[in-house]
Amino acid sequence: MPYHSRILSKDEELGKRDDDFRPKRAPTYNGFNVLRWRKRRLFALIAGLVLVYLFVANPPADLRRVDGRRYGQPAAQRSFETVPTSYSRREPTGPPPRLVDDREEDDKDKQYYEGPIKFYRLASSLHAIGRTMGQRNNNRNVLFAASSLKSVANLMPMACEMTKWDRNYVHMAIMGRENMSLDQILEINGVSRDEFPVAFHDGRGDYSEYSTDLRLEVAVGGAMRHINEFMHPQAIIMDDSAIEDKPFTRALRARGKEYRRPVIEIPEGAYEEFMWITRLDSGSLGGWFKPQIDILVHAPKESSGSLIRLLKSLEDANYAGLRPPRLTVELPNNIDKFAGSYLSGLQWPPGGDKSPVGENTLTLRHRIPVDHASSEQSSLRFLESFFPTSPDSHVLLLSPQAELSPQYLQYLQYIILEYRYSSFGSPYSGELLGLSLDIPSTFVNGSGGFQPPVVAEMKAHRYTDDENFNQKSRTPFVYQAPSSTASLIFSEKWASFHDFVSNRLAASHSGKAQKVKKLVSETEPAWLEYMLELMRARNWHMLHPAKSFVTVHNELAQLPEEFIREEKAPKEDDSTQPPYHPEEEAFLTADEPPKIVPHREKESVSGTQALHETMPFRGDLPEIPHLPLLDYRGEHSSFPETNEIRQEYVTYFREHIGGCDAQQAKRKRIGHGLGTDDLFCLPDLEPEYDEEDEDEQVAMAIAEASNPTPPHAREA
Ligand SMILES: *[C@@H]1O[C@H](CO)[C@@H](O)[C@H](O)[C@H]1NC(C)=O
Ligand SMILES: *[C@@H]1O[C@H](CO)[C@@H](O)[C@H](O)[C@H]1NC(C)=O
């Protein structure tokens, strides 16, 4: 047992027994019938008991030292000898006893006390929590913890704001060296207990203002242990570790790790900027560090200018307090010198050079050129550049035309935590393919005239009937169309997409799949077409923000390599033409070659305002079914409607693309999690039909068998 937990077990105020502290009685005591023993043994036992008694009454120095630190510091050891054996219920006032040689050494230093720690003020507020609220491992408790008065003041507005949203039981624990009473602290912060239902806990031990750093650290760890026993906080929120007391930070982090609860640090000066976290519930906050984002930038030929612009915006974004994303840049064969030197000087994650190791998690990939990439090859190459390592590992795809808002990661974190980690779950969150940072300006086929939805088109009266909301302003919306500019794709959806494309390619190569007309504009990379098919077959949608978190630039825009058409060769001789593989083109392209049409470049969220203020509805996130929904043609629809269309589409897809015959296509199939086998009839695939459907088929077969029509008549 670590030394500090022993100290804490002595805490009588909380009704803890202190047997831990005493040497254990000899186990020989149990289960023996003394009378059956022979005299000699009885004598030995009595002698043993006397020894045990002496041991308890007067423990050797070794054990007493368990009170403080094991690694002997003479001063610390001696100070423990002066500890009174009977504790009074009243907290002592004034300075604790000092040792003579301490005084001689340094009279000014007040923080000299290393004696045992007792919590006189913690019990009452912890007992008030009540059994039902805090005993379960999953509950609604969120803990703000602070040591210095300054940090208390920094966190107070956030804790109060969180109570207004009424999603969590908000607790605030004060654990530092301050000698002010809790009521005084609340008073100087202008907080009255009636106004905000924050449960305050005074987790300071006795003589806290005289504690050495080590004693403070032990005290914070001890207070956290009691707090955890009573409330099991789902997340612990603290001030920036750069300004908090170091011993406090160390103890809190250690406890957070031990209890597997995130210790969320609010970066210095970003208290208003992080106000969005007050709208999250305890489940979401408990998953704070879970989402891992992998950024994937695919840079085409001669794109170094725009690539550098994108990387600069990535470097300048806000990462403080969040789990930094990883970055992978896929480079073309010939990168120019400028981009090369920029990349070699790039430190990723930004600010990572401050850590002692200065680890760089930037990954560069270098493409080997091919004469003419088919749409199949380029889709495969792209898909293979990422695969999720866990259900929490998502990929953010960025085009080099993009320039990100500094708040992009906060936005992603907020949305992911709300829709994927909320303790109550979020309806239709499984139908989200991912999150786009952008608002499209065209339909998927590249035609202009796309109109993003407004508040008046929301699907709940609490938004459309509220005069506080400008009905003509933009809202977030879900759209059944993929986008390649700045999209985060959720882990399991990307894995499913991998499976789909491998089946899809097998179907095209089997010759059974028809070539269908492309729906997605040829100015977009080829993989989007496959993605759209999967989205329609699964009723998946992208979530778009009300205000864009990315500016998509026009200049230096390029057609994807796979859709660049060669100039007609003047010569008859065809050998100069690049090889063309018709079996690797699964879709019919338009007669006219694609052209890039410039769009109006939109401003992205500047980051000067706090995130919750730039978002509609005071930063509160609507439930997904309340959001306007656009189907892939850009028409207003709803989840039930698109789901009906999906069923028709699945039948169509199986028959025309999946290699099934008309009969097979109609039958219900069993889906397997992320797999997409149910959409295909391929030689290596054994189709698994739904039981219900199986019964139907059997019934049909029986009906047919008992049909009185003789076989020769049927043939006729
Ligand atoms: C708290 O500490 C301050 C400064 O060290 C001291 O002046 C004040 O008397 C102390 N108050 C109490 C109640 O101990
Ligand atoms: C593109 O899609 C939109 C919306 O579905 C449609 O109105 C338009 O006619 C389409 N354009 C072409 C060229 O097919």
Image (cartoon, rainbow, N blue to C red):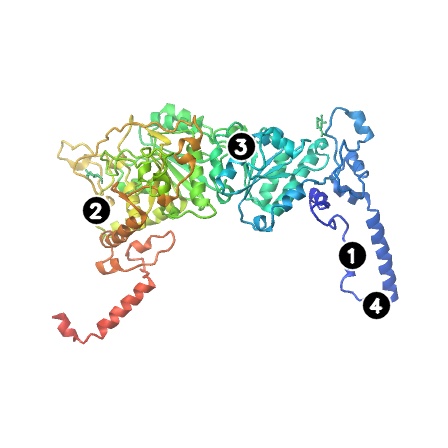
Task: Mark 4 or mark 3: name the one nearer the start of the chain.
Answer: 4
Q: Position of residue 710 (x, y in %)?
A: 16, 76
Camera-near label (4 vs 3) is: 3
Q: Position of residue 362 (x, y in %)?
A: 44, 33
The three-letter code of the residue at mark 4 reads Leu
Q: Quadrant of ligand 1?
A: top right
Q: Which residue is mark 4?
A: 35
Please indicate whether residue 110 sits to the left or right of residue 366 in the image.
Answer: right
Q: Dot 1: few (<14), some (14–19), or many (≥20) neighbours within 10 Å?
A: few
Q: Which residue is mark 2?
A: 516
Between the residue at mark 4 and the residue at mark 2, the CA separation in whole angstroms equals 94 Å
Please indicate whether residue 127 sits to the left or right of residue 170 in the image.
Answer: right
Whether the residues at callouts 1 and 2 have beta carbons within 8 Å, the answer is no
The vertical placement of 554 against 583, above or below, is above
In the picture, residue 473 is in which quadrant? top left
Between the residue at mark 4 and the residue at mark 3, the CA separation in whole angstroms equals 69 Å
Q: Nearer the viewer, residue 199 or 551?
A: 199
Q: Position of residue 167 (x, y in %)?
A: 49, 43
The three-letter code of the residue at mark 2 reads Val
Residue appearing at x 45%, y 36% in the figure: 325
SS of the residue under disc 1: loop
Q: Which mark is residue 26?
A: 1
The three-letter code of the residue at mark 3 reads Pro
Task: Mark 4 or mark 1: name the one nearer the start of the chain.
Answer: 1
Task: Mark 3 or mark 2: name the one nearer the start of the chain.
Answer: 3
Between the residue at mark 1 and the residue at mark 2, the CA separation in whole angstroms equals 83 Å
